Amino acid sequence: LAHSERNAAEVQDLLNVKSFQRVAGFASKAFLSAAPKLYHHYAKNLDSLTAAHPNLRRNFSNSVWAAATFNFGPNTIATIHRDYANLPYGWCSITALGDFDPTKGGHLVLWDLKLVIEFPPGSTILIPSAAISHLNTPICPGESRSSFTQYTAGGLFRWVAHGFQNDVHYFSDKTPEDLERISKENAARCKLGLSMFSTMEELRSLL
């Protein structure tokens, strides 16, 4: 995947906007505060990825997410979905932007949890977007809503874990013993992911 020359220039202009740089850094630090183990998992993966591929450039020097999306609106609405391409146990950041009444629309709905959350413009929320179905409600006529999101595809974690090669090359020289070990590791991956979530007791101990 690659941007056209024109789009690349437009994207770079957005990445250079100080307000987006500040929001990106704020969301990343909020991630560190809420889930430090998972945050460091992301940071280590992105550091390894950029070290192995020096031609890659981070969107923001103060963020641990590899990717970002600018949803311009003027009436950005997400229907119910899961971001299945993201790291299954990972978190993404969503920042609501625009001019709308958050008591009447633009709510974030976490469908599986039966939660409807007021999501005012200028607010940032972190959710495990691959694991939980989510959407946002419409806004009122005459209002505007856009959003800014950050995330990392699960495939980038797999790329690093597989020695910076695709599955075809990674599995090409594996012995039956290797494949059995990998199968066991994959079976335990859900438990591994959950172990990176922090309890309130763990977070209090860091204060």
Image: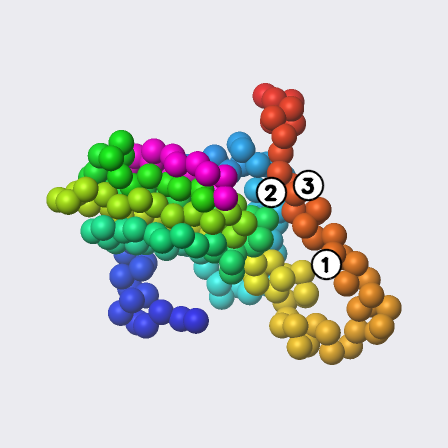
Q: What residue sits right under mark 3 in the picture?
A: 195
Horizontal relation, residue 107 to residue 56: left or right: left
Amino acid at dot 1:
Asn
Q: CA distance from mark 3 to mark 2?
A: 9 Å
What label sits on residue 186 in the rendered view? 1
Query: Which range of residues does the magenta coloring cover?
Result: 112-127
Q: Residues within 10 Å of mark 3 (few under 14, many from 20)?
A: few
Q: CA distance from mark 3 to mark 1?
A: 15 Å
Q: What residue sits right under mark 2 in the picture?
A: 38
Closer to us: mark 2 or mark 1? 1
Amino acid at dot 2:
Leu
Which residue sits at x=68%, y=76%? 169
Queried whether the magenta region covers residue 124, the answer comes back as yes
Which residue sits at x=45%, y=44%? 111
Dot 1 lies on which element? helix
* Quadrant placement of the C terminus: top right
Q: CA distance from mark 2 to mark 1?
A: 18 Å
